Amino acid sequence: MSETRHKKRAGRRILATAAGLATAGALVAAMPAGAAQGNGPSNGNGWAYGKGIGRTVDVQLLSFNDLHGNLEPPAGSSGEVHEHGATEGIKAGGIEYLATHLRDARKGNPYSITAAAGDMVGASPLISGLFHDEPTIEALNKLKLDVTSVGNHEFDEGAAELARLQNGGCHPTDGCATEGSTYQGADFPFLGANVTGEKTGKPILDPYFIWQKNGVKIGFIGVTLKGTANIVNAEGIKGLKFGDEVETINKYAKKLEGKGVKSIVALIHEGGLPASDSYNYDCDSPGPGDGISGPIVDIAKNIDPQVDALVTGHTHQAYACTIPDPSGTPRTVTSAASFGRLYTDTTLTYDRKTKDIVRTAVTSANHVVTRDVDRARDMEQLVKEWGALAAPIANRPVGHISADIEGRGSKAQEKPLGSLIADAQLEGMAPADKGGAQIAFMNPGGIRSDFVHKGPDGGEGDGVLTYGEVYTVQPFTNMMTVQDLTGGQIVTALQQQVSGRNEESPKILQVSGGFTYTLDLTKTGADRIEAASVKLNGEPIDPATTYRVAMNEFLAGGGDGFAAFTEGTNKLVGASDLDVLLDYLAAHSSADAPIAPPAAGRINIVQ
């Protein structure tokens, strides 16, 4: 990998590592927030600063979220967005195109900030994940990202690894990616105001960041969702607490006000669910069934009115809405889907006299990162160089499919790729010496992409699955477990899909062949699961009988709100989820007999 000069932006304080927790090794220590200093002498009206200056200046805020290391254009439905009312998707995404779109958008805007709302890394395709996401940080540096909040996936490899991504240095186990080079770290801060040490109660990351240019100051407060501990591996976040988003943002909004910063944007890795999945849907429409739902609604309604705009993420949805603040005044709330397929362009009109944003003048819209523009040459080179390093592993054929098998891109509760993965996990853990599994469950959020039948131009050919494609679907390398669960505990776990913390946004487990049940969406909460409908190989599950159940270690630890799974006993740990999927593909597919998408019918949906 070619060396590039690594300059930390003026005034920025780079977070330092501190002695950490037992398994994390080190955490990021809280430091005073830095400030990006602009060098331009002009305001938005073309007058020299301090001479006949206009009272207001338009500040451009470019934002995106949930990139997840997608440097190459995402494949299949994961690489498309839909225009409202259209049936055909628009191919979108790819860091070479995102760079071009952002750079073009900045032209003519001397006051321009680029911010993100978390999950820049983690659950990444092989080109980034193989190198612990150093390629993505390098790309974001080149994009001139000013600031991002952390998301839950920034903690996938633990807090110590997040500190290394911020500060630089070679990986403690795998070393440097290439001989003679050293990873330089991020030029931008990861903000985590609500991520605190249990013992100190203090943030382990910068809670806020102040951008300033020619007297214009805008503060950014970054938080991740308070439920982060429930959706990441517990080992890497021992000793950390994830506080309430609203309480934290309101606390630091007051701190920024005390520093004379009255223009504030919150970067929140938590989001909403608009009524339409089109990127340009008008979620302010008052029609029946329109609008936006999900956790961000209550969060937005309770954040201090001093905060002028909310940039959000996590749900991978696209929206540019207004939600009333506590005073009843509309406030802009945005999200740019995921994987670099969109970016949001928001205009913040800054009043130099009040030092605040004129909320009534704020405008915002999502824009497609189309692939019909010139590729940014520096990003093209970056992808080429890292791709060449990954190619010997990534391009190895590992299986064959007869058609697209949708996972992440499927809108169905029962996803074809989810069924295939669950079948692979059951087969891999069914032998007596592997655990004797009778049932397998797969969490839907762990399915990161689709299996796409059409091969890339000049690539391996149609229907061929490569190691890189399979890794993109299962990038976490979670270890598989098999444990004893009673039929009653299994039913309780199924009810937890649609109740408690999952009631508003259900997480429907993918199930192995032979396991069936009815999901009644006309009901609410736990009543959506008909206990009598839960069967294994056609026989009703007995609440008192013990079954051997396979799942990844994330689910076994109660991840995604499945507390029932933590009650399992006689646990046996096996191979990784990636390895059992690779073994299944090798055993069940060939060029002459490719795997077909599994038929639906394991989950009977009533709606």
Image (cartoon, helix red, strand yellow):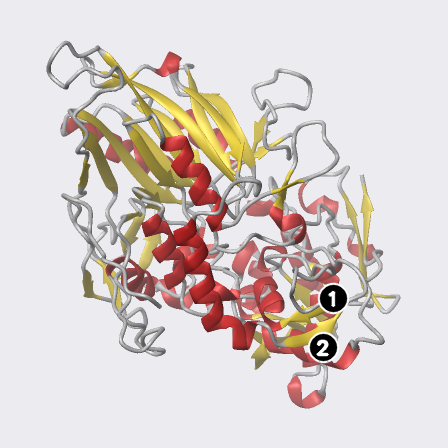
Q: Which image quarter holds the C terminus?
A: top right
Q: Secondary structure at mark 1?
A: helix
Q: Amino acid at mark 2?
A: Tyr
Mark number displayed over residue 420? 1
Residue highlighted by disc 2? 584
- For residue 213, above or below residue 221: above
Q: Note whether residue 155 is visible.
A: yes
N-terminal label among 1 and 2: 1
User: Viewer-proximal residue, 281 or 370?
Assistant: 370
Quadrant of residue 437 in the image?
bottom right
Quadrant of residue 417 in the image?
bottom right
Q: Residue at x 46, y 60 (%)?
A: 383
**Residues at badges 1 and 2 in contact (C-beta under 8 Å)?**
yes
Q: Amino acid at mark 1?
A: Leu
- For residue 134, above or below residue 434: above
**Residue 220 screen position, x and y as percent:** 28, 35
